[in-house]
Amino acid sequence: EEEPTRHEVDALKLQGTYPVIYIDFKNCKSDRFDTVREGVKRVLNSCFKQHRYLEKSDNLDEEEKEKIKRYVGAISSEGLNDDQIKSGLQFLSEMLYQHYDKKKVWILIDEYDAVANVAYRKFNADDLDKTIELFTGIYENALKGNPCLEKGVLTGVQYIARSGMLSGLNNLGKFNFTDAKYAQYYGLDQGEVDLFFGHFEVPKPLGDKAKSWYNGYQVQKYNGNYVTSSQELVSKYNIWSIVSYLKRGEFSCFKSHWEESGNIDFLGELLSKPKVREKVEELIDGACISFDRKDDFSSNDFNQLKNMISGSKEITSDGLAVLFSYLFIGGYLTIDGPIQNAYRLPNMEIMYEMGKRLIKHYQHICTIDPAKIQSATYVLQDIMSTPHRERMQEHFKNFYDRFKEVICTVRLVDDKNAEGVFANEDIVHSLLNYIALQTQHTTLGSELYTTKLHSKQKGRADIKITNKDVGVIMEIKCLPVSHRSDNHMKEALEQAMSYGNLLDTNKNLFIAINVERGTRTSEERTIELLCASVVSDGQHVFGINASGFNDTFGVD
């Protein structure tokens, strides 16, 4: 076994040798000052109850014991005024100092910024001022010029600069996740988690999957007294998430453990801003984004964030930096290797959280009648089940009509600054995927990368649907009227047929679909469809043009 370091020995020698006050302000968060104050009273009451033995201390006089009872009593503590709240921790440290024969006290404050974090985003100016004043009083009384204090330790999500809350404290040191020297003490590394996996007998394949869900926070590697290299990084697990996963014991079940944090609920409102939505979509797609990170948030930054959430103006690049800095500080982003100012989502857990909010946004603006989706699915099911030449054109006319109803339901827009779904191939692709997913006894493939027939070129087939008899390849376009040519549908069909090597079925259908992208309303948006049916007795082509009439678009 390795010998413990000098610092570890010193830490163990100190354990249990100092009186300690521990208090957590997490549950004091609220939407207005009055309820915050009541929450702080309850937390103080709980904190004093941990030390109610002081009521019988031989080192305290009767007046001091009566004062302690005021904080300990459930009813009396409700009557505490603001001055008594502000001086509570300082008074408790003084009583512990006297009880333990003038042994100085450690004060540990968890979630010190939890209330302020919410207050800056949600409170009106008057309630915000009262909240900051209250916590400034608590922290300054307890931690500034307190002769009974040995050391104070505050933990939270972020340091709020120029808020006044901590500005009066002396010798304040800040140590966060981006500080290489102290980053080693945040999270768990792979070696530490492997010990847990061994103890709980987590199968290796499930352990690997747990890594993709809960690992991924990148920090600079620190070796002794120096950072090894700006390019040498260590990957860390989120402690809360991996411990919750192991504690639950269902090792094949992976879920998010951020569900109740509520720290980024406001992101749903900001997804209506195109610049924010585009960045979030890039992150969910696995890409990294760049911005000038702010490590310390000021009251001005919070005001800017608040105005972005409630305002209708487009967000500036500085506003984006504030938003994504907030997400980074909150643990929703990590650095992307050695690349300067580049950030990404750390793992599947955060991708799920972001994706959940993006899905909710699209559900809000793109509510589609399930009956219309189901109707289109039924027609596609008929096409896959009864691919007879004499009925194929009838089936495709039905599919054309049903799919157009779906398209007209979605709020497709052509201005990126407009509220709705920007009309492009990806959106049409997603709708067709959703319809195809619900067909029975079929296999669906999407964005299949392969070599084209009669060519060495690589390409991606948009959609492939197969059952035991029928194979379908779909090529999707989203062209404005101005970009249409005499051959645009023919070229799209030829592109679909170039992926025929993906099919090994007896009856093959190659379909080109174009949904108009232009300035029309959803109700006016046109659709074009062209299909080639390839069976043993030859090839048959049929299609429907933008006006809804039969048209083969010049294809024989």
Image: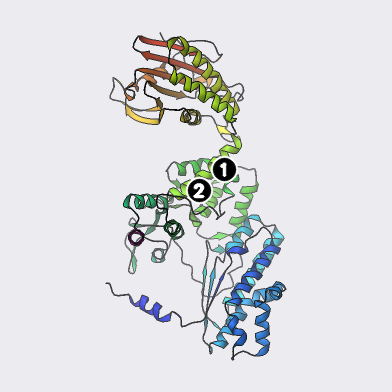
Residue in the foreground of this view, choosing between 14 and 16: 16
Q: Are marks 2 and 1 in contact (CB under 8 Å)?
A: no
Residue in the foreground of this view, choosing between 43 and 158: 43
Look at label 1 and name its amino acid. Leu
Give the residues in magenta.
186-201
Q: Quadrant of residue 535?
A: top left
Q: Which mark is residue 353?
A: 2
> In percent of the image, x 52 and y 84: which residue is there?
104
Lateral position of residue 453 relative to residue 60, left or right: left
Q: Could one spot residue 75 in this view of the protein?
A: yes
**Residue 345 x, y percent position in the rendering:** 44, 49
> In percent of the image, x 50 and y 13: which residue is there?
394
Disc 2: CA contacts within 10 A as few (<14), some (14-19) or many (>=20): some
Which numbered mark, 2 or 1, is in the foreground of this view?
Answer: 2
**Residue 546 x, y percent position in the rendering:** 54, 15
Lateral position of residue 485 relative to residue 76, left or right: left
Q: Which mark is residue 271?
A: 1
In the rendered image, the quadrant that contains the N terminus is: bottom left
Would residue 198 be counted in the magenta stretch? yes
From the image, give the main secondary structure of the stretch colored magenta. helix
Where disc 1 sits, the SS reads loop
Would residue 90 be counted in the magenta stretch? no
Where disc 2 sits, the SS reads helix
Q: Which mark is residue 95?
A: none
